[in-house]
Image (tube, helix red, strand yellow):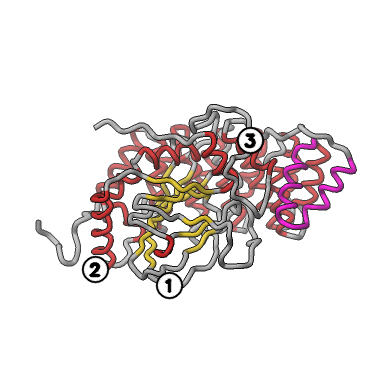
Amino acid sequence: MQEKQPLLLTDEQMREFITNGCLILKTDFSHAFHDNLLEQLNTVYAEEGNPGNNLLPRIRELQKVFDHPVVTGALTSVLGPNYMMHAHRHGHFNALPTAGGWHKDSYWGYDRVRNHHPNWAMIMYFPQDTPVDLGPTGIMPGTQNHQKRAFEANEHPAEVLASGEAGTFALIHYDIWHRSTPNILGKPRYMLKFEFMRTELPTKPSWNNQEREWKKPANLLAPLAAHDLMWEETWNWLSGELCSLAGTASSDPQEVQELAGKLSGDETIAINASYDLARRGQAGVNALLDGLRSDDVHVSRISAYGLAVAGSEAVDGLIAALNHENVNTVTHAVFALGELSSLAAKAVPALTELLDHPEDKIRSAVVDALGFMNSPVEDVVASLTRGLQDQNAQVRFMSSLSLSRLGASAESAVPQLEIALDDENRYVRAHAAETLNYIGTDRAKNSLIRFLLNNRWCSTTTKANAFYP
């Protein structure tokens, strides 16, 4: 059967995703399809508990959801055509009349700098009709790039509820603030959460792009923060234009000084100041480098976001910052160099040296950053292959993910990826397998097939149904 073409997002939907950090969409499966899903979910949860990472193999029909053109189109539009499904997935069950607290999801307990660019996304799928009283997920629009929670009340008039008929789903920026809402009806409510990652940098729009220039969406739901420069830069980045802000504004010393003074203020103001400084040539870069070296971790992090879009003029200063004594400064410098990707290729030797650093978070940031640098590819692959052998599980996992971004160029890492298939960490194993698929050479595919055959799992075998039929 021929696969249906992805139903790509429109320009207006992409504008909404960039600003609001979320879209509420819907598949068109029949009621019978969702009734069947619910019946299976009820049985599995009652007899076996939450299947967690085994949601897809345990409930096979669920794969049809992630093959649906509305779902594939939304993910392709935001993450590019070769996005990867993360090995972590979870079915959230809620029958409680109390609300959950606002939070950002962690990276499965790991620590990393959160991306402003949409490199990670999440789908929250509702397989039953979910009216407001059944407790849909609540999402605070526009908060995806805010580390701090800038609103006090548990209920907020700007909150977006993922409420609707069966088949409704929320596509969200991974880092957005969200919560569970009260299930007043007390009936079972499932939300199936799946995570996805970009595996290649954008070279052109991957949505149904008709208008090249950025403009705000009509449905702007982000009342807590306006980030005009960041939104425009993200639109351009998604269109394949790297560091579009660099050199587009005056480097007037007084203006630069005033902006630099705002890096330590309110988070919204500080973020806007960092992107504004990124426009102002070497003077703006120097102000951001001063902020990067701040002992205040928030100032350092926000300065890194500006440096990450400031262009090639930021590279030398960021390389110099790799020798700083402050762990956060080094981590943020590594992050910014990774975001600069091809513009920062000269940083690869200095980044590679940091694989000997005693701090896990620095080594993890390094292998994450190297995945966006495809030159010199032999050195990058060698460094990431070394990262697969690190003592820290996050470093090993991020090394594997970064290798997947390099495709067949990472073939020399296959022997170490074969070893990683037997790693003690479930996510290292899972994404070593994913990476072999993205490398795609004969040896990589043969190793992957052997691994999958050895680990095959019968989705209908349960305690009550061990053998027959």
Tag 3: amino acid: Lys
The reply to whether callout 3 and callout 1 are in contact (CB within 8 Å) is: no
The spot of residue 302 in percent (x, y) is 70, 51
Tag 1: amino acid: Pro
Tell me what residue is drawn at x 55 percent, y 29 percent.
203
| Residue 456 seen | yes
Please, which residue is most extreme toward the right here?
A: 254
On residue 97, the disc is 1
**Which residues fall within the magenta stretch?**
253-281
How far, Cα to Cα, is label 2 from label 1? 24 Å
Q: Quadrant of residue 235?
A: top right
Depth check, mark 2 against mark 1: the one in front is 1
Depth check, mark 3 against mark 2: the one in front is 3
- Are there few (<14), some (14-19), or many (20+) residues within 10 Å of tag 2? few
Answer above or below: position of 460 versus 63: below
On residue 215, the disc is 3
Disc 3 on helix, strand or loop? loop
Q: Earlier in the sequence, mark 3 or mark 1?
A: 1
User: Disc 2 designates what residue?
Assistant: 47
Disc 1 on helix, strand or loop? loop
Answer above or below: position of 263 versus 16: below
Q: Earlier in the sequence, mark 2 or mark 1?
A: 2
Give the overall secondary structure of the magenta segment: helix
The reply to whether callout 2 and callout 1 are in contact (CB within 8 Å) is: no
